[in-house]
Image (cartoon, rainbow, N blue to C red):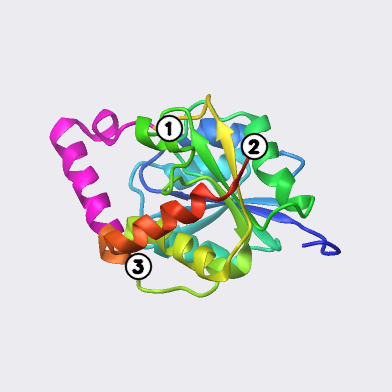
């Protein structure tokens, strides 16, 4: 990206995250590396959109829940930046330094994209040095302006496949204090387990097991920060 003026739009898809999104927005809004913060309210019924608007975020309200992929694609249509930082709305422990370290290597032209390695990623992913479905990513906005009919939680593996085929230069950014609450903690044990099953279904509807293994091999060759 040498010679290109990089500007970053932050996209936060959110569905019924009124209890958690404020913490993420308190860090993202006003961060000097971010040109704007866009919250896509994906049909929430708990006041998520109002909280985001009151905090000062630019809010896109979806009339019905369409899933994470549809929400992110919608925001990318209106993003003003050359690049996008994706953040999940329920992150815990997010600090300004996490955003800075995710954005800086792209701004300096050292890589094309970055992806976080959270502190509470599964132990096997931490041992390998990559969480291939991590939701904190920086990428050119064009990567999200080729929407496809993706099952909600298949977005990350769909992006991975595009990066692998395009031979994007990737950097993995360790964020040891960053975590995402378990679905069981948010929804209750049985609904949480069902949500986890649904997430895996979306992933493997989008990318076959051999493709996921190719993605892991691709990320294993990435640089680390």
Left or right of 27? Residue 67 is left
Give whichever of discs 2 and 3 has the lower sequence position.
3
Q: Mark 3 points at which residue?
A: 150
User: Which element is circle 1 on?
Assistant: helix
Q: How far apart are marks 2 and 3 (CA)?
A: 30 Å
Q: Report if residue 34 lies within the magenta region.
A: no
The reply, left or right, for residue 121 in relation to residue 140 is left
**Which range is magenta?**
181-203
Between the C-alphas of marks 1 and 3, the distance is: 29 Å
Residue 28 vs residue 195: left or right? right
Q: Where is residue 220 in the image (x, y as percent from the top left)?
A: 50, 47
Residue at 21% over, 37% down:
192
- Percent across and percent down for residue 129 are 49, 37
Q: Check the image and report above or below for 6 versus 190.
A: below
> 178 left or right of 26?
left
Q: Identify the mark at residue 225; answer none if there is no mark.
A: 2
In the image, 157 versus 48, the foreground residue is: 157
Among the two numbered marks 1 and 3 on one chain, the one whose residue lies closer to the N terminus: 1
Q: Main secondary structure of the magenta part?
A: helix
Binning the other alpha carbons within 10 Å of mark 2 as few (below 14), some (14 to 19) or many (20 upward) gives some
Tell me the tag on residue 127: 1
């Amino acid at each position: 990206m040498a010679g290109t003026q990089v500007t970053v739009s932050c996209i936060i898809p959110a569905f019924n995250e009124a209890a958690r999104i404020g913490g993420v927005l308190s860090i993202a809004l006003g961060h000097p590396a971010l040109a704007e913060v866009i919250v896509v309210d994906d049909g929430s019924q708990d006041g998520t959109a109002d909280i985001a608007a009151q905090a000062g975020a630019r809010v896109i309200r979806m009339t019905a829940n369409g899933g994470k992929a549809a929400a992110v694609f919608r925001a990318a249509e209106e993003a003003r930046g050359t690049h996008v930082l994706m953040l999940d709305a329920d992150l815990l422990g997010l600090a300004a330094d996490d955003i800075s370290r995710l954005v800086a290597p792209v701004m300096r032209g050292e890589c094309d994209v970055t992806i976080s390695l959270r502190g509470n990623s599964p132990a096997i992913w931490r041992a390998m040095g990559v969480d291939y479905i991590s939701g904190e990513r920086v990428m050119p906005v064009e990567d999200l302006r080729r929407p496809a009919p993706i099952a909600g939680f298949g977005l990350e593996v769909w992006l991975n496949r595009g990066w692998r085929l395009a031979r994007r230069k990737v950097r993995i950014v360790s964020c040891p204090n960053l975590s995402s609450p378990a679905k069981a903690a948010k929804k209750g044990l049985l609904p949480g387990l069902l949500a986890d099953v649904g997430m895996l279904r979306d992933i493997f509807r989008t990318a076959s097991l051999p493709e996921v293994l190719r993605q892991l091999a691709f990320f294993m060759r990435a640089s680390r920060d």
